[in-house]
Image: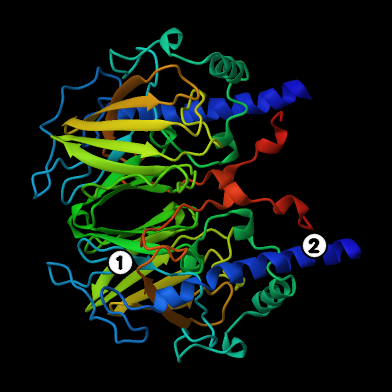
Amino acid sequence: MTMRRHWLAAGGTGIALTVVLSTPVIPHAQAPAGDREKPGAPSAPTPRRPDGSVNLGAIPDGKGFWNNGLGSLLRTGDRALPTNLTLEDVPFRPWAKALYEFRRFRGGLDDPHVRCQPAGGIRFFTVPNGMEFIQQPELNRIIMIEGENREWRRVAMEPGRKHPPEEQLNPSYFGDSIGWWEGDTLVVDTVGYNEKFWMIRGGMPHTKFLHLTERFTRLNFDQLKYEVTIDDKGAYTRTWSGGWIMPWQATGYDGSDSGEIHEYFCIDNERDSEHMPDR
Amino acid sequence: MRSHCYGGVAAAIALAIGVSLPVLLDAQAPAGGGQAAAKPAPPPAGPPPRLPNGQINLGAVPGQKGFWNSFNGQIIGKTGNSLPTNLTIEEVPLRPWARALYEYRDFRDGLDDPHARCQPAGGLRFLTAPNGTEFIQQPELNRIIMIDGENRDWKRIAMEPGRKHPSMDELNPSYFGDSIGRWEGDTLVVDTVGFNEKFWAFRNGLPHTRFLHLTERYTRIDMNRIRFEFTVDDPGAYTRTWSGGWHINWQSTNYDNSPNGEIHEYFCIDNERDSEHLER
């Protein structure tokens, strides 16, 4: 019993450390971009590329990245969209609700990401260390890169592209993503997930039937609205949606002035899993 | 028990070879695929493509796909796709401790390789891990991003004119280090320092230390090939600088030979089943 308490306390330390590490980042993330000095000053407008499309990245000769990491699908925190559901309204199937409650009861100890599994699904946007979009219209794709484990995923932008048929999909962490623009919003449609990860920080369950529709709208220079619709008949009784605002960060993750995503590898720092219970 | 352990590793290696064999053949096939796999390497296909700004394009041309398959790169020796100027192992200016360590790693047949335990592919390892590599040139952002199929890793090459490495005491030792690039004519030159010592920078287990300073030169000599040259400057492990290189082949199919030319998803940690059975 004392053993067990010890493990849980260690988990709590990890969480506390994460919070401490993230806190100094937030003021920078909300700081104005470019030469605007006053915190809280209105953001510059949404930047555009030479072809007129929205630029989801830094402007020429600029730097910076999106500070992912703190989003929630529920109605919690300053960044959550007002349309987000409360936990009670999430249309869990009974097994999924029970599993979610168990994961919460365990305080996240069973999270595969803690054991350095890739940040699939919505988790890509709920891990720390920053992310960027690289738009390559000439190659009909958008590459997303992130600091967490230096991972990247591809969004295929070819007009008319379809997902492979279900029997040809190789279930994966990032799935098969197809994107298109609806006005100034990038819409990304993804299927083909495996079940080896938690689709979002906190442990809301998903199954191989997960079909995500993500909508990225750069509201202004400093804010990216992220909305996602979850369609997973295995875990939920109907589709449901949620989202949050991701802030632009023009500094390094540690507050230094680089604006460049740093190198972070979970596996390099992973010291805990062998001490965790229930292997 | 012991033979069982080795058996497992041997099976894994056999599997790896089985998986890569068709790829090697395909990488030597002409762009656009085809059934030329068993024939001698085709003649070079067309001049290297360029970006609208005149720079060499190290990626796919607009509307097309593909990636670089550098899995079979030869760091030393003169076989395969190696450059004729490559050293033999006897010629590599190893310090005595480094030679002894290299020989031990060789004797152990790679069992101690951190990459086999899913550590990131730092240094030259970025190129010689399987699953494909691409360059994403962003001159407007003064950088080139390299992406790798292996563990879906990426690294940044800073291209700002006049950029310097941080001072030694400010460098945070890392797997990918601090990379600064520049164009010398049509050759991309990448200068990297700031490596940690937690990985094998070379697939064959040649040692390095935190003093490693790597210079890489990428010259796309035609549509289908990059001449890759590297210089190792590491006074910790070597008595003088030394160089080598190979030709990197373009692949316009998927890694498993199906059509498309897109880098697939591979995560070592997802498949890692062996490390607890390896001898420690």
Mark linked to residue B239:
none
Q: Image quadrant of residue B192? A: top left
* Chain that bears disc 1: A
* Chain that bears disc 2: A
Amino acid, disc 1: Gly
Say what secondary structure mark 2 lies in. helix
Name which residue lies at 61% across and 17% down.
Answer: B104
Amino acid, disc 2: Trp
As measured in the structure, the alpha-carbon distance from the residue carrying label 2 to the one carrying label 1 is 43 Å
Q: Residues within 10 Å of mark 1 (few under 14, many from 20)?
A: many
Camera-side mark, 2 or 1:
2
- Asked if labels 2 and 1 share a chain, the reply is yes
Front residue of A108 and B145: B145
Residue picked out by circle 1: A179
On screen, residue A239 above or below A125: below
On the question of residue A227 being in view, the answer is no
Residue B105 horizontal side relative to residue A64, left or right = right
Name which residue lies at 55% across and 25% down.
Answer: B14
Farthest residue, direction right: A1
- In the rendered image, residue B168, in percent from the top left (x then y), is placed at 44, 42
- In the rendered image, residue B30, in percent from the top left (x then y), is placed at 21, 30
Q: Image quadrant of residue A165? A: bottom left
- In the rendered image, residue B206, in percent from the top left (x then y), is placed at 49, 22
Name which residue lies at 45% across and 54% down.
Answer: A167
Mark linked to residue A7:
2
| Between discs 2 and 1, the one toward the N terminus | 2
Name which residue lies at 64% across and 54% down.
Answer: A115
